[in-house]
Image (cartoon, rainbow, N blue to C red):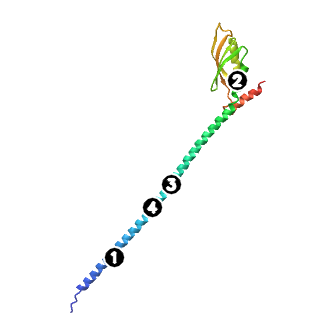
Amino acid sequence: MPQINLLPWRAEQRKERKMAFLAALGGGTVAALLATGVIYMLFSSMISGQQQRNERLKAEIATLDKQIEQINSLEAQKQRFISRMDIIEKLQRSRPEIVHVFDELVRTLPDGTFLTGVTQTGHRLKLDGVAQSSTRVSTFMRNIDKSQWLKNPELSVIETKKDQALGATFTLFADEVTTAGDEDDAAKPRARKGASP
């Protein structure tokens, strides 16, 4: 029986397997490196795209913030204009009031009574004067109470001196009826004025 030596053939086969393994290992390494590079580039492009979107959103948010500030400043301007218009309207409505007040002072002042000073603080009038007697001051206060442009008479001081020829000096306060408030208050004095003879 002949003897066959298979050692060289096995060595050759082992060598081929080793080369195939190394080739497969190299191919797998290259494929892994290529896959890693592709994934890295993909994620990099996604991150850069998201950063661009974020920057665009920040720019839009800044633009909207500026627009909101402009809207708020316009609202504040609108409120200032409305308050100015209200003040101007009240002044327009109250413009003839001082004429009515002086006219009413002349009408309510009884004979024998003279005013030496009239001071107005807001809607409050301070009336300084001289009367022949204290009854004239009482009549003056009753006339103010019945008046359509004056109300709430309050006597502050009344002095009767013997050396004075006219009798008594007095100081009293009264409130002016204003039409610059609400429209109902504005309508009342006009209605009463039309009703008076």
Mark 3 lies on residue: 59
Disc 1 or 2, which lies upstream in sequence?
Answer: 1
Secondary structure beneath label 2: helix
Secondary structure beneath label 4: helix
Q: Residue at x 56, y 47 (%)?
A: 70
Q: Can you say whether 119 is above or below 77 in the image?
A: above
Q: Position of residue 93 (x, y in %)?
A: 69, 32
Question: Is there any visible trace of residue 98 in the rendered image?
Answer: yes
Q: Position of residue 64 (x, y in %)?
A: 54, 51
Mark 1 lies on residue: 24
Task: Give the number of callouts.
Answer: 4
The alpha-carbon separation of the residues under discs 3 and 2 comes to 65 Å
Three-letter amino acid code of the residue under disc 1: Ala
The disc at residue 48 is 4
Disc 3 or 2, which lies upstream in sequence?
Answer: 3
Q: Residue at x 62, y 40 (%)?
A: 81
Q: Nearer the viewer, residue 42 or 83?
A: 83
Q: Is residue 154 left or right of residue 41?
A: right
Q: Residues within 10 Å of mark 3 (few under 14, many from 20)?
A: few
Question: Is there any visible trace of residue 182 in the rendered image?
Answer: no
Which mark's residue is nearer the viewer, 1 or 2?
A: 2
The alpha-carbon separation of the residues under discs 4 and 2 comes to 81 Å
Disc 3 or 1, which lies upstream in sequence?
Answer: 1
The disc at residue 96 is none
Q: Position of residue 35 (x, y in %)?
A: 39, 69
Mark 2 lies on residue: 102
Tell me, yes or no, whether the two marked residues, 4 and 2, touch with CB atoms within 8 Å. Answer: no
